[in-house]
């Protein structure tokens, strides 16, 4: 799995990089066919203080690309929310590509 963590108007510190990496381990625990992960952490230059910390994630898995973004006043909370969204998408994608119908059961019923 290739992991790219970059920042826009923010320096990605080793602590922040470690936090994002440990959170993204949850996604690879559910689905091991993750090819590429790109995370962009941004601090918006706007006057209102709420939701100016933003985290975006683009995941390339076998068969599809998944994207999610999250905004919060705290960057760590935005990363938490982002990983929750990505986790739901990855689990849903895994369910879609799995064959839920057993062919042998259908042949026995026919």
Image: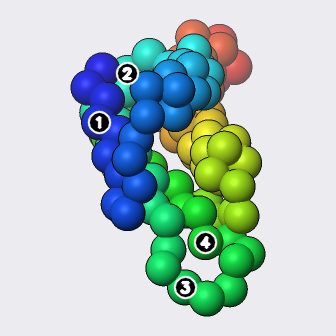
Quadrant where the N terminus sits is top left
SS at badge 4: loop
Numbered tag placed on residue 46 in the rendering: 3
Nearest the viewer among 83 and 102 is 83
Residue 23, percent from left and from top: 60, 27
Earlier-in-chain disc, 3 versus 1: 1
User: Do the CB atoms of the residues marked 4 and 3 lie less than 8 Å apart?
Assistant: yes
Residue at 52% over, 33% down: 16
Nearest the viewer among 81 and 97 is 81
Question: Disc 4 to disc 2, how far (Cα)?
Answer: 32 Å
| Residue annotated with mark 1 | 4
| Residue annotated with mark 4 | 52
Residue at 68% over, 71% down: 51
Earlier-in-chain disc, 4 versus 2: 2
Badge 4: few (under 14), some or many (20 or more) residues near its Cα, within 10 Å?
some
Earlier-in-chain disc, 2 versus 1: 1
Q: Nearer the viewer, mark 1 or mark 4?
A: 4
Q: Nearer the viewer, mark 3 or mark 1?
A: 3
Q: Is residue 83 left or right of residue 28?
A: right
Question: Disc 3 to disc 1, how far (Cα)?
Answer: 26 Å
SS at badge 1: strand
Q: Is residue 81 visible?
A: no
Q: Nearer the viewer, mark 4 or mark 2?
A: 4
Earlier-in-chain disc, 1 versus 4: 1
């Amino acid at each position: 799995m290739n992991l790219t963590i970059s920042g826009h108007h923010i320096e990605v510190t080793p602590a922040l990089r470690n936090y994002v990496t440990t959170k993204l381990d949850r996604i690879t625990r559910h689905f091991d066919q993750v090819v590429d992960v790109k995370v962009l952490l941004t601090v918006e230059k706007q006057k209102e203080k709420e939701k100016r910390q933003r985290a975006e994630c683009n995941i390339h898995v076998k068969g599809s690309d998944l994207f999610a973004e999250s905004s919060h006043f705290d960057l760590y909370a935005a990363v938490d929310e982002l990983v929750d969204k990505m986790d739901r998408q990855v689990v849903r994608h895994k369910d879609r590509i799995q064959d839920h119908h057993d062919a042998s059961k259908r042949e026995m019923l026919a």
